[in-house]
Image (cartoon, rainbow, N blue to C red):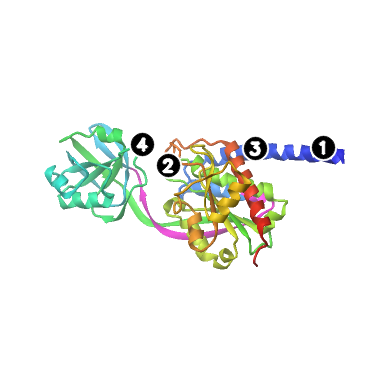
Amino acid sequence: MRQLGMRAVLGALLLGSTAVASIENDFSAVLKFGPRVTGTPANEGARTYLEGQFRALGYTTRRETFSYPRFDDLGSDVRVGERTLRGFALQGSAGGEVSAPVALVPGVGTPEDFRGANVRGKVAVVRRGQLPFAQKARNALAAGARGLVVVNNTDGELRSGTLGERVELPVLGVSTTTGAGLQEGQPVTLAVRVRQGDVRGVNVVAYKAGVTRPELLFGAHMDSVAGAPGANDNLSGTLAVLDLARRSVNTSLANRSYFVLFDGEEDGLRGSRAFVKDNAALVGSLRAMFNFDMVGVNADPLGVSGDGALVNAAREAVPTLQAFSGGGGGSDHASFAQAGVATLFFHTGIDRNYHQPTDTVLDPALIRTTVDAAQKTVDAVLSAAPASR
């Protein structure tokens, strides 16, 4: 008995060491692909690697494809003399190149603000805030502007901005630093280069052979936004799902679960919505969906949100877990919640590298802590009551 106990301890230590090395190795391997924007070679390279890791563990995998229309910025900027200043086209903007003087617009961009700034035939420059982007753009167009630059009202680039509708005006979002360099009457060339078309997304589903009606689904999105390598958002969540699959491979949990890496989350939860739509019977049999998004940087303590009973179970199992509100519709669990599935969302807050080129770091220890908490919560959920099958 003493010898057996020692072997068990050594085995646990070796398993822990392997888990640490695997998270670190997987992180390094995937990050090298660069930004994993849906439909890009980097996205496909990362998916192929991750799919291989699931298979190496003995899981069966399948790919589920879907498509959707997407607006892409092909590299937009504003040129001032010899300087080229990077910006990002707002979704819904028309493409085009405009050479004209700058007109600085005071206020928030009301019709009166644009008329008072005399923007006709010019590139209007207005601050972000108070009015929706589309309203600012419509007001600029009505006042005769040939193009619009929207200056961010916080530090960092203005990425992933959307008009929410088509506006026949080139509209560029820029940082506060770039905006400060645009002066009244200064000649500039605004170049908004965009493409609108369908993109193909691919979800990866991993499971033990023969499992067709899982009780639990563990998911995370593997895509990132343009220009952001996506270490925390959301390679951290992706690696949490992979590590959970690794730890569970020789347990009964593996025979009760699906592990899913969603694509297209950054474009509006496209992958999880497609999964729910295309797997209605499977989704209807789930007892819970656990979602992991941004769990590798401790901007805030690890927290959970979602179904009240699951949140309570998680906090009873792991008293250090925080309960947070908000984020209800901002990640893939929302697609399952809308289908009536109880969900639990693991998250450590928005860090300063969110959607930035600097999103290149994560802490493997935080991922392990997240997986520990998920395992304890799963044990509590599965032992609370038998499944209604």
Mark 1 touching mark 2, by CB under 8 A?
Answer: no
Q: Which quadrant is the C terminus positioned in? A: bottom right
Q: Is residue 256 above or below residue 227?
A: below
- What SS does tag 3 mark? helix
Mark 4 or mark 3, earlier in chain: 3
Chain-order first, disc 3 or disc 2: 3
Mark 2 = which residue? 355
- Residue 284 position, x and y percent, is 57, 66
Say few, some or many: other residues with alpha carbon within 10 Å of mark 1 (under 14 / 14 to 19 / 20 or more): few
The location of residue 226, given as percent across then percent down, is: 42, 44
- CB within 8 Å, label 1 to label 3: no
Judged from the image, the secondary structure of the residue bearing numbered disc 4 is loop
The mark closer to the camera, 1 or 3, is 1
Q: Distance of mark 1 from mark 4, alpha carbons?
A: 53 Å
Q: Do we see residue 94 in this rendering?
A: no
Q: Nearer the viewer, mark 1 or mark 4?
A: 1
Question: Residue at label 1?
Answer: 6
In screen coordinates, is 338 left or right of 314?
Answer: left
In reply to whether residue 57 is colored magenta, the answer given is: yes
Q: Is residue 245 magenta?
A: no
For marks 1 and 4 on the same chain, the one whose residue lies earlier in the sequence: 1
- Describe the element under mark 2 as helix, strand or loop: loop
Question: In the image shown, does 304 or 82 lie closer to the viewer?
Answer: 304
Residue beneath disc 3: 20
- Residue 343 placed where, x, y %? 54, 56
Q: Which residue is mark 4?
A: 156
Q: Residue at x 22, y 32 (%)?
A: 81
- Amino acid type of the residue that numbered disc 1 sits on in the rendered structure: Met
Tell me the crowding category of disc 3: few under 14, some 14 to 19, or many 20 or more residues within 10 angstroms, Cα based: some
Distance between mark 4 and mark 3 Cα atoms? 33 Å
Q: What segment carries the magenta color?
A: 52-75
The residue sitting at 58% across, 58% down in the picture is 288
